[in-house]
Image (tube, rainbow, N blue to C red):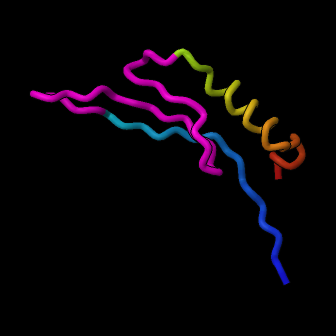
Amino acid sequence: MTTPTTTIHEPTVLSYPGTYGERPTPWQRVYMCTCGVELGFDEEGMGSMDPEAEYEQHLRDEGVTDEEDES
């Protein structure tokens, strides 16, 4: 017998502080859904995407309704 699985969709942000010195790297933020889909990317504040809108579009693409998302 197969147990049904439920995919949980919640927005999350991964933050990377960056480094300084001879070879500096910029700070970065990656906006993701807990299901593993990357929603957007921001580096040094130069991102022009809207993470909330991307998340809403992702939910529509996945066919998640408001009732399912709240459970």
Q: Is residue 67 left or right of residue 33?
A: right
Q: Is residue 46 left or right of residue 32?
A: left
Q: In this rendered view, identify the residue nearer to me: 27 or 39.
A: 39
Q: Residue at x 79, y 37 (%)?
A: 61
Q: In this rendered view, identify the residue nearer to me: 19 or 38.
A: 38
Q: Residue at x 87, y 40 (%)?
A: 66
| Range shown magenta | 18-47
* Predominant SS of the magenta segment: loop
Q: Position of residue 25 (x, y in %)?
A: 25, 29
Q: Position of residue 59 (x, y in %)?
A: 77, 38
The answer to whether residue 61 is above or below residue 44 is below
Q: In this rendered view, identify the residue nearer to me: 59 or 71.
A: 59
Q: Is residue 53 magenta?
A: no
The answer to whether residue 65 is above or below residue 29 is below
Q: Residue at x 19, y 27 (%)?
A: 24
Q: Position of residue 50 (x, y in %)?
A: 62, 21
Say which quadrant the N terminus sits in: bottom right
Q: Residue at x 73, y 36 (%)?
A: 58
Q: Is residue 27 magenta?
A: yes
Image quadrant in which you'd find residue 17: top left
Residue at the farthest bottom position: 1
Marker count (numbered): 0
Q: Position of residue 65 (x, y in %)?
A: 88, 42
Residue at the farthest left position: 22
